Image (tube, helix red, strand yellow):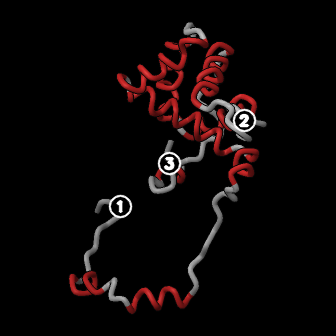
Amino acid sequence: MSSVASQRLSVPIRHTTPPRSLSDVEQDTILRIADTLIPAAGPNPKASDVEEFLTYLHLALAARRDVFDIVVAAATRLSDVTDGDLRKELKAMWANDKDSFDPLSAVIAGAYFMTPQIKELIGYPGQHRDPARLEDAADELETGILDPVIERGAIYVSAAGE
């Protein structure tokens, strides 16, 4: 795998699908966990009622491939827990197993807040480009931000490792 993309460590490869499909049990459990972590409140729908939540859940799992196995393992451990006990078990996981709870909750919350419905509901327009004006660069240089670099002198570090 010596493609140009794999050599550019500063620009990671963008994945849009999880490492594998979720089983029905895994997906159903994650949806139950999502509804427990993000219940309906006022105008805010519970996670599983959000339009396109599953699409964005899969996208979040793809983006966080590094924790996919942890999230799935956490869901598997909770798959036999009843809805009535799920909140208690999640609180215990939060208290005793942050290595599982943190990625699980981050993926679920990330999926929820990425959906167009929730972004519109909370008034978040999403990310957008906000390029600096030419005079901003000149103004910034006048602050002396580069003075320590200029005083230090030139340093050459080969990106090729020569």
Q: Residue at x 47, y 35 (%)?
A: 66
| Residue type marked 2 | Pro
User: On screen, 2 above or below 35?
Assistant: below
Q: Residue at x 63, y 38 (%)?
A: 111
The x, y position of residue 77, in whole percent, is 49, 13
Q: Which quadrant of the figure has residue 158?
A: bottom left
Q: Nearer the viewer, mark 1 or mark 2?
A: 2
Q: Earlier in the sequence, mark 1 or mark 2?
A: 2
The residue wearing badge 2 is: 45
Mark pair 1, 3: CA separation: 15 Å
The residue wearing badge 3 is: 6
The residue wearing badge 1 is: 160
Q: Secondary structure at mark 1?
A: loop
Quadrant position of the C terminus in the picture:
bottom left
Q: Secondary structure at mark 2?
A: loop
Q: Tell which residue pokes out farthest to the front in this image.
A: 42
Q: Earlier in the sequence, mark 3 or mark 2?
A: 3
User: On screen, 15 above or below 33?
Assistant: below
The x, y position of residue 46, in whole percent, is 69, 31
